[in-house]
Image (cartoon, rainbow, N blue to C red):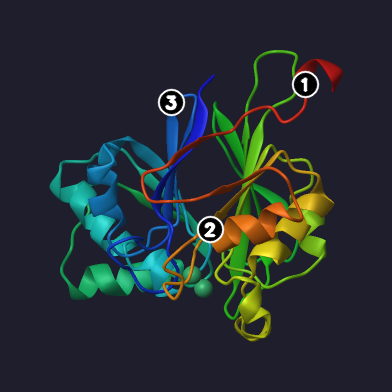
Amino acid sequence: MNFYTTIMGSGAAVPTLMRHCSGQVVNVGGYRLLLDCGEGTQHQMRAYRQKLQSVQLICISHLHGDHFFGLPGLLATLHLCGRTLPVTVIAPQGARQALDVLLALSSTRLDYELRVIELSHADKRLVFTSPRCQIWAFPIWHSVPTYGFIIEEVSRSQSRPRSMAYCSDTGYHEELADYVRDVDLLCLESTFADDMMSVAGEKQHLTASQAAQIAQQAQVGQLLLTHFSARYRESDVFLQQASAVFPNVVLAEDGLVVPVSYSKSPARL
Ligand SMILES: [Zn+2]
Ligand SMILES: [Zn+2]
């Protein structure tokens, strides 16, 4: 079964010509979901040939603009392009109110059902199931309520299901490793390199080596770093610092396709 994520945006805070704001389209056996929807995500979906109408579920980590401001525009475009199938949004508490206000003030009518599942729990919970995948959400550490997600395939065979975790944005806490233990692909933010460790702590973000420490502690298969600050023109430093702690690291870039592969032989599990 296909299981991969395609990066729509890999930058932090502000869009640049090199990196757009956060967004990833995950394909699990043909079921497509969007992880975060920063400004410009719908443009990036067109640029990287992701059919807008094929997205069935949208998971928003938190309501900071670089993860959320693209959503009202995308929802409006789906309507204008004739959508009738429901769209489900999973997001922290407040998303429903924010969307209702924006859509009402702009007289935007949606001819499809917009379902919003709001998150306010303080532990790890199963929040969504479909025939292809299950979604778990858990709180992470940031300046506003923020959730990480685990996408786990629903496997029809005897082997264990593959899974990926997505955590952006978060400060460094060892407990994060417990939430994402043994996933095959861990996508973590790495806003800063290690030269900015104190700033990362203040702003509740991760550095490259901190993200790698989480990956190491959690015994994941592969670490995918994303959400890079625009202050870094070259990304090699992230790879060098993370690889010194955890061996299997890949850096996100806009348009990159990253498969979720078995990190351990399924026959032995
Ligand atoms: Zn962010
Ligand atoms: Zn944020």
Determine the secondary structure under disc 3.
Answer: loop
| Amino acid type, mark 2 | Asp
Location of mark 1 (residue)? 265
x%, y% of residue 112? 27, 46
x%, y% of residue 56? 39, 39
Q: Residues within 10 Å of mark 2 (few under 14, many from 20)?
A: few
Spatial CA span between label 1 and label 2: 30 Å
x%, y% of residue 253? 42, 51
Spatial CA span between label 2 and label 3: 33 Å
Q: Which mark is residue 30?
A: 3
As rendered, which of 101 and 81 lies closer to the eye?
Answer: 81
Q: Residue at x 27, y 60 (%)?
A: 40
Q: Which badge, 2 or 3, is on the more N-terminal residue?
A: 3
Q: Residues within 10 Å of mark 1 (few under 14, many from 20)?
A: few
| Amino acid type, mark 3 | Gly
| Amino acid type, mark 1 | Ser
Q: Which badge, 1 or 2, is on the more N-terminal residue?
A: 2
